[in-house]
Image (cartoon, coloured by chain):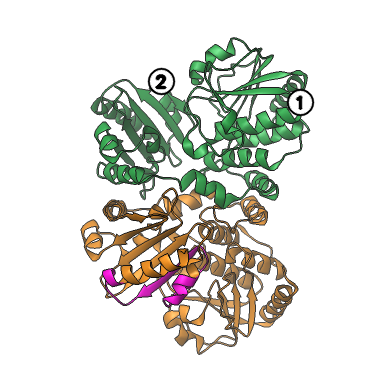
Chain colours: A green, B orange
Amino acid sequence: MSSAASRDRRRIVERLGAASRVLLVLHVRPDGDSIGSTLAMAAALRALGKATEVVAPDPIPPNLAFVPGAGAVVDAGATRGSFDTALFLDCASLDRIGGATADLERAGPILNVDHHSSNQRYGEINYVEPQAAACGEVTYDLIRALGVALDVEMAVGLYVAIVTDTGSFRYQSVTARTHRIAAQLLGLGVRPAEVAERIWDNRSLASLRLEAAALRTLEREGELAWMDVTPQMLAESGAAAYETEGLVNLPRSLEGVEVAVLFSDEGRGEVRVSLRSTARVDVSTVAVSLGGGGHARAAGCTLGMSLAAAHAAVLTAVRAAMR
Amino acid sequence: MSSAASRDRRRIVERLGAASRVLLVLHVRPDGDSIGSTLAMAAALRALGKATEVVAPDPIPPNLAFVPGAGAVVDAGATRGSFDTALFLDCASLDRIGGATADLERAGPILNVDHHSSNQRYGEINYVEPQAAACGEVTYDLIRALGVALDVEMAVGLYVAIVTDTGSFRYQSVTARTHRIAAQLLGLGVRPAEVAERIWDNRSLASLRLEAAALRTLEREGELAWMDVTPQMLAESGAAAYETEGLVNLPRSLEGVEVAVLFSDEGRGEVRVSLRSTARVDVSTVAVSLGGGGHARAAGCTLGMSLAAAHAAVLTAVRAAMR
């Protein structure tokens, strides 16, 4: 850890120590890292005697509703009273909190804890560890620095954060330290098979029908592969929009493919684009150039255009980045 | 570790210390645990000055050919000279070595190192650790007990063994110790993203076409789901038989499914059956009753009958086990 990050963490610990009512804010389309890190931290703050509330700009996906504390998360705009502190975990920029801006008006200064290198440092204090494989790792450090003894419920949250944001310990970001933290969490009682079953073995027949339909659109051009989801596929399969998550891993799984793209047209006049890269290409620059964001190997954007226009815009930008 | 296992390991260490020419034998249809454990152990024995040869009754799958030492593995019947010791890793019974029985005739007594609870204890010494998530964990212990300093090539083999046999750290068998070993291996230079890319992001367009075709046969009956691969699907997709590996994870991924079955008819007058279970049902008993074997949650058998007859035989046995 750099000395700057070390100082930032110390400042965050001091501020949280002095806080009494903390608002924690999930990001839009909350994922396992956002939910797991935030709920573990909320539990740690309660263990220190703080009042906490967790607000979500979008619903918790059904496969993550098992994370301890998820039942107490409130919708954007539904928090009560005021807060002396706002705490963001895993949120790279302020435009990722959707309708929770209304709740933020009744909260004190923002503390920003993250691992995205693209983090906009929008907080009064910003503790960003771009080397961490998940915000869950940063949160683990922070909870320990707060002097809180981890319990099994916090451990499940942190494990969910890490296992989801590393593709089950497979991404380049994973280090020996990631596994040492996982060993600690399993020692506290996390059951990896039960967590994995809830997160990944939770598919509907409709999502498998959607996968079969989407596979028929798979195209490959050298080291680039892409696949579509159309409103017709969603309607015919009966799959929900959130069930497109993970489909980008199919073109990504092709041998020799460097960049994979999923174009998801959910029939709302916009196309959600998911980008994945293996090593050579930084897809976050492509996503940022199209108004999105993310990491070098996993990024995305949403384009207000037709599927054909999104193909043209994204594939042109990706081809340029690959040259 | 039990005191019996501790004694067995000590005896194996003594015998390997006294050996000078060791034949290591992979099992039929060798998987990541068989290949990774065996090649790491062969390298460790060479570091101790032993001559080694590794024999494989079936070809190394292309996605595992990167494991250090895989290039020197020889086909069954192609070993030269004689050996004072035969070492089996991850091999539950002697009928799992196919044509390598010929090579075994020129070898000394068998040392049997494994983690399958169904292990038949066919060796002169049997060191079986059913608690280990992979034979790679047992092999890690054995290499350290031999006093060999692990290098990055051995570490890659052990990591491949563990990451493949635990479904990337997701199975029930994974413990804090599994992650502590993984942390050691990453510390030695294993790059998880590169390993994962070679093992899993190595698919052919044909295998994705096969997946789409097989998904159309998916059937569900309560907590039981199954899927077929037919000779026609293999021909039309152009996929190779080994590319059916992993397809059983699709029915297994359905919410609420306890037992998943893949029936793979490769057009050779027999059906390969893969069984997966989440928790309640021990599918190894089903597999054993049909002449196969495996673990409680992952087992299989090969039936010399038609696809329809295999459906009837297996689904009847599974339904009985589920009651």
Q: Position of residue A314 (x, y in %)?
A: 32, 28
Residue at the spot 71% in from the left edge and 40% down from the top edge: A151
Quadrant location, the C terminus of chain A: top left
Queried whether the magenta region covers residue B266, the answer comes back as no
- Residue drawn at x 31%, y 23% is A268
Between the C-alphas of marks 2 and 1, the distance is: 41 Å
Q: Which residue is mark 2?
A: A291
Q: Quadrant of residue B16?
A: bottom right
**Quarter in which the N terminus of chain A is drawn:** top right
Q: Residue furthest front?
A: B323
The chain identifier of the residue carrying mark 2 reads: A
Q: From the image, state whether disc 2 or disc 1 is nearer to you.
A: 1
Tag 1 or tag 2, which sits nearer the N-term?
1
Residue sitting at the far bottom: B105
Read off the magenta span: B285-309
Left/right of residue B236 with respect to residue B15 in the rendered view: left
Q: How busy is the neighbourhood of tag 1: few (under 14 within 10 Å), some, or many (20 plus)? A: few
Element assignment for label 2? loop
Tell me the kind of residue under disc 2: Gly
In the image, is B166 to the left or to the right of A127?
left
Q: Secondary structure at mark 1?
A: loop
Q: Amino acid at mark 1?
A: Gly
Which mark identifies residue A49? 1
Q: Tell me residue B181's x, y (percent).
A: 65, 56
Identify whether A296 is placed above or below B69. Answer: above
Is residue A137 visible in the rendered image? The answer is yes
Image quarter of residue A35 = top right
Which residue occupies 46% across, 48% down? A201
Q: How many numbered circles does the render carry? A: 2
Say above or below: A241 vs B103. Answer: above
x then y, percent, for residue B131: 64, 65
Does label 1 lie on the same chain as label 2? yes
